[in-house]
Amino acid sequence: MNETVTMIFGLIGGLALFLFGMNNMSSSLQKVAGDRMKKVLGFLTRNPLLGAVAGALVTAVLQSSSATTVMVIGFVSAGLMSLPQAISVIFGANIGTTMTAQLMAFKISNYIYPIIFVGFLLGFVSKKQKVKDLGAVIFSFGLLFEGIEIMGSVMKPLAGSPVFVDLMGKVSDIPALGILLGAVMTLVVQSSSATIAVLQNFAAQAGPDGVTSIIGLAGAIPILLGDNIGTTITALLASIGQSRNAKRTALAHSFFNISGSVVFAFFIPVFAKFVTWISPKGPEVEVIARQIANAHTTFNVVCTLVWLPLIPIMVKLVTFVVRGQDQSQRSLAQPRFLDEKVLGQSLPAMHLISQEIDRCAEYTGSLLVCARQELEGRTAPEKFDQLFQGVKSLQEQIVGYISRLFARGVLNEEQSEITAGLLFVTNNIDRITDRCGEITGCVRQLRTGGHSFSPNASRELDQCFTISQDLFNTAMDAIRRGDKHAAQEVLLEKNQMREQQRKCNRSHLDRVTRKECDAALTPDYTGILYGLDRIADNCVSIAEEALDQISFVALEMPTVLAGEVEP
C-alpha cells in the first residue's frame, strides 16, 4: 500500500480510536461520579468564581468543554440559569478541558495494554454495576492512549519529508497561518482535545537534527490558539434555534477564546519562553508534549482570571450583539425545560425532566380546578378543552424525552431507578388528566339533558373536589422534596375520600327515594364521584414513589423564569 495512504488510514483510525475512547470514558465517568456531579453543579448558585470552579470540575469529568457548554446553553434556554452564571461556568470549562492535554503529555506507552486488560477484566468479571462502570473508564482510557500511539507512529515519516518540514517552517514564521490551521482542524474534527492530541504528536517528531521538534513550541502555540477558536463553533451551532440568552452564552464563549487568542498571538515569543521556564527540562522532542499542555492550561487560566471580573462587560457586549428580549409568552404544550442537547449528561437531563414534570403538575392542578368550576357553571368548556389538550401534549413529550434518555445508556443503576420512578409519576399525572376529562364528560352530559344537581348534591361533590385537590398538592409536595411525612399524609387522607364517596352515594340514593333528586342523574353523579376517587388512587401511587425514595432531581440552581401563559 502507498506510504501516504497508510499514513492517512493510520491517522484517521487512531483519531477514531481516540474519540471513541474519550466519549466512552466521559459516559462511564458520569455513571461512576453519580451524585458527586450534582454537588459540583450546586456551586452554580454561588458567585462567578465558584461558577468557574464548577465549570472546570464538570468539564474535567465530561472530558469535553463543548459538552459542558452545550449543557449550559440548554440550561440558559430553559431559564434555569442566568446569563452571568452561564458565562462564568463556560470560563471554567475552558480550564477544565486543558486536563485532557495534560493527560496526553504522559508517556505511558509501555502500560497501555495492561491498562486495557485491567479495564476489560473489571467490566467482564464483576457483577456490580459500579465496578463495571469503573472498568469501562479504565478500558476507554487505555483505548484513548492507544489511539494517540497509532497517530504518533504513522506521523514519524513526516519528519523526513522536505515538503512537510517547509510547511511547518512557514507556520512557525507566520502565526496567522498556524491559527487558521488549528481552527480548521478543530472545525473538521469537532473536538479541540483531539486536535491538540494530534498537535502534541506532530510536535514530538524530531527534526533533521534528531533533537529539536519538527515544529517547535513557537510553531505549536499558534495552532493551539487556532484550536481554541475552532472549538467555539460547536457552541454556536448548539445555540441555533435557542433563546437569545442561549445565543449570547455561545457568543461569550467565542469572544473569550477569540480575544485571548488575538492578544496572545502578539506575544508568542514571550509566551513560549514562559512556558519553557515552567515546564520540565530536557531534549525538546521529549518535553514538548508537556510544554503544549502547559501552554494550553496557562492560556485558559490567564484568560479566565482576566475575564472573571469583567463578566458585566461581557454581558453588555453579547447583549449589544444579540439584541432584543426573549419571547415572554410561551405555549403550555411547548416544553420549557427539556433540551435534546443535554441528553448526553445524565444528572442535568434528570434535573430538566423534574422541572418539566413539576410544571406539568401545576397545569394538571389547574385542570382539576377548571373541572370543578365547570361543574359549578363558572367557566366555559373551551377553557378546559384548551388546557386539557396542552397538558396531554406536554405529558407525551416528557415521556418521549425520558425514553430517549434511557436509550442513550448514560444512566447508572441508581439514576435509572429514579428516572423510572419519575416516569411512573408522569404516567399518574397523565391518568389524573384523563380523570378530569371523564368528570367534565359527565358534567356536559348532564347539561346537555337540561339537568342540574340539587344544592346538597353539589355541596357534597364540592367537598370531594377539595379532598382530591389537597391530595394532589400534598402528593406533589412529597415528590418535590422527597418528603415521606407528606407521602404518609396522602395515604391517610385517601381513606377520607373513600368514606366521603360512600357517604355521598348513600345521600344521593336517599334523595332519590324521597323524590328530591331525579334517578336519571345517578350515572353522572356516581361517574363524577368515581373519577374523583380514581384521582385519589393516582395521588396515592405518586406518594408511594416518594416513600420509595423517588424525588425530583435538583441541582440547586435558582430558576430564572420567563413569563408563561396558559394556551
Image: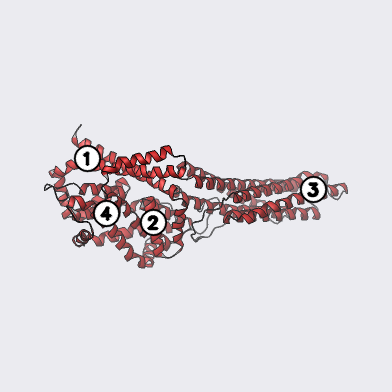
Sequence order check, earlier mark of 4 and 2: 2
Image x and y of residue 139, in percent: 36, 42
At x 33%, y 62%, the residue is 304
At numbered mark 3, what does the secondary structure look like: helix, strand or loop? helix
Q: Mark 4 points at which residue?
A: 293
Image x and y of residue 325, in percent: 45, 61
Of tags 3 and 4, which is closer to the observer?
Answer: 4
Sequence order check, earlier mark of 3 and 2: 2
**Callout 2, which amino acid?**
Leu
Vertical placement of residue 255 versus 240, above or below = below
Q: Is residue 448 visible?
A: no
Sequence order check, earlier mark of 1 and 4: 1
Q: Distance between the residues labelled 4 and 2?
A: 17 Å
Label drawn at residue 57: 2
Q: Nearer the viewer, residue 446 or 495?
A: 495
Q: Is residue 40 visible?
A: yes
At numbered mark 4, what does the secondary structure look like: helix, strand or loop? helix
Q: How far apart are marks 1 and 4 (CA)?
A: 22 Å
**Callout 4, which amino acid?**
Ala
